Amino acid sequence: MHIFEDEKNRIMTPKNTDEAVCPAFHWDSEQLISILETMTDAFVSLDKNWCYTYMNQRAGEIFGRDPKTMIGKHIWTEFPEEIGQPFHLNFEKAMKEQIFIQMEEYYPPYDKWFENRIHPSKEGLAIFFQDITRRKKTELALKESEEKFRALAEERALFKTMINHIPSSVFAKDQQFRKTAANSAHLKQMANALGLNEPLTESEVIGKTDFDIYPGKTAELYYQEDESVIKNGETIMNREQYSINAAGESSWELISKIPLKNEQGKIIGMVGIAHDISELVYQKHILNERLKELRCLYRVTEILQEINVHPGKIIPKLIPHIVQAYQHPEFTAVRILVEGIYFQSDNFMETPWIQSSVIFVSDKEVGKIEVLYLKEMPENDEGPFYKEERALLDSLARMIGQFIDRSTKAQPAYLLTSLLELSNDAIVIISLDGTVVTWNKGAEQLYGTPAREIIGKNITVFYPSDLKNELQFFDSKLKQGESISHHETKRRRLDGSQMDVSINLTPLKNGEGIFDSFLAISHDITERKNNERVIENERSRLRTLIQTIPDLVWLKDPEGVYLTCNPQFERLLGVQETEIIGKTDFHFASKENATVFRKEDLEVIKTGKPNINLGKLTFVSDGHTGFFETIKTPMYDSKGEVIGVLGIARNITEIQQSREALAEREKQLSILNQTLENRVEERTAELEAANKDLEAFAYSVSHDLRSPLRHIDGFSRLLRKTITEPSSEAIRFFDKISESSSKMSSMIDALLNFSRLGRKPVSKIPVNLDTMVKQIVDQYQPLKETRNIDFKIGKLPIIQGDPNLLQTVFENLISNAVKFTSNTNPAVVEIGCRNEKDDKHVIFIKDNGAGFDMAYADKLFNVFQRLHTTDEFEGTGIGLANVKQIIQKHGASIYAEGKVNHGATFYIAI
Amino acid sequence: MGKIPPILYAEDNENDVELTLTAFRECKLQNRIDVVYDGQQVIDYLTYHGKFNDRPEEKPVVILLDIKMPKMDGIQALKIIKSDENLKTIPVVMLTSSSMEKDLIESYNLGVNAYVVKPVDFTEFLEAVKKIGFFWALINKTV
């Protein structure tokens, strides 16, 4: 342990530390300094007077001083701010107590932490130190976060405990609808919903969706609701939900669902809270039921207050109020039986869900009141019924009993009702104003209307419209105490069906001895009446038939005695029916004839077959005669016994005459037909011959007229060849010959064509003139290059016609227009149509060309008629003749207007 | 065949015969032209009957028939020719003034080989006859 004298030697050697310079090794000062300068720790040494004896390069860097300048300087002069601070105190302590001190401390001026190892010696202090700021900060941060975490954990535990103690269900779900939290109440509630005894555990629930836990339908329901919260951010507050768990227990819950958002406001899930409010709801329900029962009792009491009215009118009024008192009014039916009469709600039917209570009048059972559910309802105190409802029903039965007791005493007519019910006749009691008081089973059957529907209403609803004042007639008699017996009349059921009835009416006195009502007993006599009517109708029809039939009709019994006859037969014999009946033919005819008639009658009776014969009869009434066909037929009764012979004689005089006349006609007709046919044949033959002639003529023209022309042309050419040097005059003559023969040839062709056209039949179909004319005009387009010509085409109709023939017409007329405007500049050809009032079209083709003199207008359409010289305008002169022929064949007409040099217009009226 | 076969021409009108023969001459046809004056003579010619009894045996290269002829007309003659096994291969050309549709249709129905309407214009007539001659006598191949 030594201190070097010079600078290099003034190094203190620490005592017990590894890093200290170990005295056992005799480091030379060079080595030492080299170590001190290369080590990473900073190092300073101080003498007893707190002056620096050494400072290595690292320390210099930390302090930002040059180590060389620091030697000999007083530490606390250099770092006065540290006086009294931890470094100063520890350095003092180490020096004073000569102990090794290791310390870690923050040095504010440098904002750094340092670890100092202070080695004391008598000479001073050797201090190694390191910048530990980074380590220190990490340590501190770690510590801080640990504390925070602990605090959080505690908070969370507290919160969880708290939530678990809340009696309401609390749960949370994440964005994927998975449960992220569930409190004990919720776990219990879920178990309950699934019908389990033990609550679910968190691990069974957390991370699962409702689809993993609940049945599909329930999960679907929850999912839809959760979706609106999680996806749309909606909040559901205090929704009441009814549910039935797996064990069949029902419950009501008040549910709220709130979206859960992170700090950025993004929805990350939801929280749900549910309270069980079953008890509350149940209490409310019970309260409501009691209220309904009370209301019913109140109304029934009120209704039963009425006296002096027949119970039949009162009891039905109770029914709707009783229905309303029950837990499920929409499925409740009521029936009240009193003294054998049933009163019931419209929806009444027998079901097994029934509650009933007997009605007593002075300890005697007079009926019962029944309430039925139309379908199965949840079990309750008494079947599906509450015990309170039983109490209600019993008290209703008592009240009705008391009411009947009161009414019975007040209303004597009511006593009859039980008696009336036993009868099968329709027995009713009606007050004099027509109000129905009682209505027994028999009446229900006869009128097809139940008592509950008619009691209290007016009986006249059953009266046909034409018998409405029948009641007044009854009244007038009944008021006087008179009865009405076997009154036959008609009644109309409510469904509209009519019936015949026989009624007995008896007036009834009230307590004050006044006739105020009556007893009516009715029978249905419809069938009897109908039978009577049918028989009467049949009889009258038959009678009319026999009376009006033009034939003679009579009936004789098997003995030949007349039973009946019609007026026609009367005329034959010339006496009235009354004088005929009871007599035989021997009375009216000669003995021979009467014998013949009798024989015929017997024959018919014997064979059972009709006898027909023809003969002439003379009428005694006016002496006229006729030819008659007489048929005699046996007549049998329902047992098959012959009861007589029916005779019918028909006048066939006219038929006979007609037949003869007809035969004559037919004969004449046949002769006439033959003549006609012959004439038609003749005419056809003539026509055929004429056609043949025409054809032959045309053929001949075609064949024979041409040949000479050809010869003229041919030989004139040959002649010209023989002339070696023809004069110009001769050449011109030859040309003329050629030209003429060619002209005549084309005239022959045109004429042939014209005659052919005349024989051609017209086949009409719809023809669109618009397209036809446009196509024809299009052919003249090239003409526009050499001529100033304009075509104006208006809208043209579709007409019935022969398209080929009409094509010829328009080709001719348009080519004429073009031809006759060849010297006009500018030339205008106009084609259009006017609609006349009688549905005819007038088509016109107008040009501004050469025109014509109207004086020759009638010649225009003649064959080979020309109004211009060939030099002016070429042509065969047959075009317009063709046009006219075609137009006439179409049943149309053509005419022309024109003026020389002012154009021409052709009109086709079709 | 070393010999040039003749053309048979049936025509009753002398003028027509003359003009037609002139036309044939103009086109310098090598074939001899045998002229007959009615349908019956056509058949006689072809079957070596009547005045054609000792005619040397040769088939005409083509028969030109007028329609309107005395005794037997051209259509009848055509009918006989075309229904005869030996004769029906000889080409028959109707050379006529008639442009009637009826004749045309009937001729074709009977199996005529060509139907020519004689033009009135002589220049055109010459042209037509020349063409007939060239085609049927030179170009067309017969059995």
Image: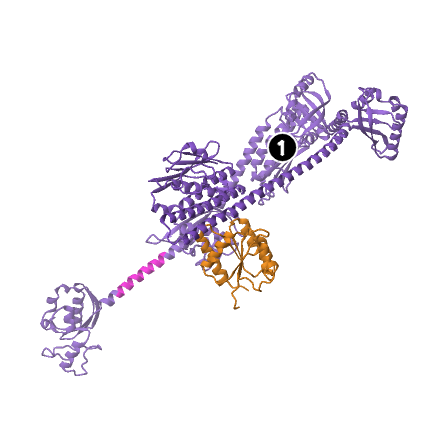
Estimate the x, y position of residue B37 in percent, counting from the top left.
56, 54
Q: Residue at x 71, y 21 (%)?
A: A506
Q: Is residue A26 left or right of residue B29?
A: left
Residue A689 lies in the magenta-colored region: no
Q: Is residue A842 left or right of residue A596?
A: left
Report the predominant secondary structure element of the magenta stretch: helix
Residue B67 visible, this orientation: yes
Q: Is residue A751 left or right of residue A849?
A: right
Image chain in purple: A
Residue in the foreground of this view, choosing between A185 and A319: A319
Numbered disc 1: secondary structure: helix
Estimate the x, y position of residue A343 in percent, counting from the top left.
64, 33
Give the residue furthest to the top. Answer: A480
- What subunit carries mark 1? A
Residue at label 1? A398
Residue in the foreground of this view, choosing between A463 and A826: A826
Q: Is residue A565 left or right of residue A699?
A: right
